């Protein structure tokens, strides 16, 4: 019995060991698969990569003209608000070469290449700014386009695009048989040319907030592309440049290390700063949407955040009470959804300003005018109803007894109304059949219309209007003859 139990325990233990070994084998297989999938060190060509980067650094002759043409194309694209044209300028721009040269030279301690890269990049920047300035000075924008405004306020996304774009570019550069499509894609994504053109536009119109915002975006792109280059080359263990003089080698190595730190510290600081600003802007937009816009009693005109002063200026149409302002402030300070806005203050404008009073007064006046117009319309509708009733009664009376010799109805009330509509300067109108005799023997019945005109009219206009009125009355009253007599003569 004891032996059987021992055999069972040994069998269970053996199965456990088999399962553990199988699991270890599976984990090892997955690990090897991932290493083989993601490892790109074996596919690196050190010499060809360094040579290719150095080849793109020089800036003279054809490269200078290509840069000038690229600036013109990008400026036209910004002017026309055309994304396709701006992308075309990014593809032909040679700005990427010196930036990669800076990252590579720091990584391999190549001071000569670093010096050339810095000089060429500085020259490119100055030439780009001058070219863009000249273009926008000669062809100024009518309005700030969305393509241009998108380059004056960098956020966390621009930092991430520059960094990951630089990583993708260097991985493609170090691969045996460079992947050209990746290089073109990174040139579009990192967008080095449009910020320089936007900075030139800022200089041309004297808007230095545009200039500094665009240059800030360009510096972000430059720093993080160089940083990505430095990290990839260090990861791939590119050989350090060797110098015959050991003291010089040590000094250059120290200088390269200092430069690497100088590049990385601003990069980290920039990333943190832009990340915080992006977080604050997102939470401000969320606060406006959740706490103000969804409440009908708050009629918001606009809001203006000031991240440096830590204030949010709110302008309302309606008058805000102190209690409502305190409620909004408490939501800003207490609600965990606005953690980044704890130190912010609300600056409510509009309810006590002169401009708001003018708007409110004008609004009330317009409402009063609208109400008066409604009352007038209602009165006119009532009068029209009474007039229609009067016309119906008069027509009934005319149909009962007022029939002329030709048995034709004379609807005088309708005719008088239409005559006033046609001739608004008509003061009075009358109609009668007058007994008349030329030989004092035979008596005729003559239809006569008596009229009175506004005295401000001159005779020439009155004569013309009388002729038209007589013809019209003759047709309406179905008369062969009609005499018109002016009362105010």
Image: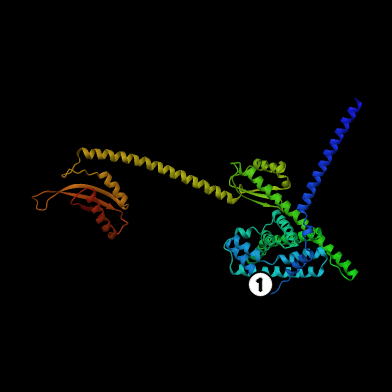
Residue 75, above or below 449: below
The reply, left or right, for residue 320 in relation to residue 369 is right
Viewer-proximal residue among 333 and 387: 333
Label 1, residues with CA under 10 Å away: few <14, some 14-19, many ≥20: few
Residue farthest to the left? 441
**Going by the picture, which residue comes out furthest to the right?**
2
Q: Residue 221 occupies which quadrant of the picture?
A: bottom right
Instruction: Name the quadrant containing residue 383.
Output: top left
Residue 147 sits above or below residue 346 on the image: below
Position of residue 197 measured from the top left corner of the image (x, y, whole percent): 65, 65
- Is 238 left or right of 182, judged from the image as shown? right
Secondary structure found at label 1 = helix
Q: Is residue 202 visible?
A: no
Of 81 and 374, nearer the camera is: 81
Q: Is residue 209 above or below residue 313?
A: below
Residue drawn at (59%, 51%) of the image: 354
Q: Is residue 376 left or right of residue 462?
A: right
Q: Position of residue 11 (x, y in %)?
A: 86, 33
- Among all residues in the image, which is located at the extreme bottom? 61
Per the image, the residue denoted by label 1 is: 65
Q: Residue at x 89, y 28 (%)?
A: 5
Does residue 252 appear left or right of residue 208 in this picture?
right
Count of marks, rendered view = 1
Q: Tell me where residue 26 appears, x and y as whole percent.
A: 79, 44
| Residue 146 visible in the current orientation | yes
State the colouring used for the structure image.
rainbow
> Which image quadrant: the C terminus?
bottom left
Q: Quadrant of the N terminus?
A: top right
Residue 476: x and y in percent read: 24, 48
């Amino acid at each position: 019995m004891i032996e059987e139990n021992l055999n069972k325990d040994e069998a269970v233990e053996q199965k456990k060991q088999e399962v553990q070994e199988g699991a270890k084998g599976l984990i090892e297989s997955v690990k090897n698969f991932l290493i083989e999938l993601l490892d790109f060190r074996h596919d690196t060509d050190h010499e060809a990569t360094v040579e290719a980067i150095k080849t793109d650094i020089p800036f003279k002759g054809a490269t200078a003209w290509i840069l000038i043409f690229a600036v013109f194309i990008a400026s036209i694209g910004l002017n026309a608000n055309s994304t396709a044209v701006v992308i075309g300028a990014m593809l032909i721009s040679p700005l990427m070469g010196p930036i990669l040269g800076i990252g590579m030279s720091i990584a391999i301690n190549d001071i000569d290449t670093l010096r050339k890269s810095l000089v060429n990049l500085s020259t490119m920047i100055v030439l780009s700014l001058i070219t863009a300035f000249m273009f926008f000075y000669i062809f100024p924008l009518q309005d700030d386009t969305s393509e241009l405004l998108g380059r004056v306020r960098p956020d966390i996304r621009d930092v991430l695009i520059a960094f990951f774009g630089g990583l993708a570019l260097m991985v493609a550069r170090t691969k045996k048989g460079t992947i050209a499509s990746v290089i073109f894609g990174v040139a579009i994504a990192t967008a080095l040319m449009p910020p320089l053109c936007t900075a030139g536009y800022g200089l041309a119109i004297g808007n230095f907030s545009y200039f500094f915002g665009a240059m800030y975006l360009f510096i972000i792109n430059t720093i993080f592309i160089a940083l990505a280059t430095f990290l990839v080359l260090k990861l791939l263990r590119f050989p350090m440049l060797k110098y015959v003089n050991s003291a010089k080698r040590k000094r250059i190595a120290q200088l390269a290390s200092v430069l690497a730190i100088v590049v990385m510290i601003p990069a980290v600081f920039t990333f943190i700063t832009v990340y915080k600003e992006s977080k604050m802007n997102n939470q401000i937009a969320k606060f406006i949407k959740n706490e103000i816009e969804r409440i009908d009693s708050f009629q918001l005109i606009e809001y203006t955040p000031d991240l440096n002063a830590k204030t949010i200026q709110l302008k309302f149409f309606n008058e805000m009470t102190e209690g409502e302002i305190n409620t909004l402030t408490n939501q800003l300070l207490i609600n965990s959804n606005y953690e980044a806005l704890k130190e912010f203050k609300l600056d409510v404008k509009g309810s006590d300003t002169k401009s708001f009073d003018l708007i409110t007064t004008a609004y009330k006046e317009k409402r009063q005018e609208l109400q008066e117009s409604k009352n007038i319309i209602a009165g006119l509708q009532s009068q029209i109803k009474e007039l229609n009733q009067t016309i119906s009664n008069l027509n009934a009376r005319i149909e009962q007894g007022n029939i002329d010799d030709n048995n034709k109805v004379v609807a005088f009330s309708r005719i008088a109304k239409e005559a006033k509509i046609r001739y608004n300067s008509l003061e009075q109108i009358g109609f009668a059949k007058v007994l008349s005799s030329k030989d004092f023997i035979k008596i005729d019945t003559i239809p006569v219309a008596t009229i009175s005109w506004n005295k401000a009219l001159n005779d020439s206009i009155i004569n013309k209007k009388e002729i038209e009125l007589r013809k019209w009355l003759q047709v309406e009253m179905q008369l062969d003859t009609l005499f018109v007599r002016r009362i105010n003569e």
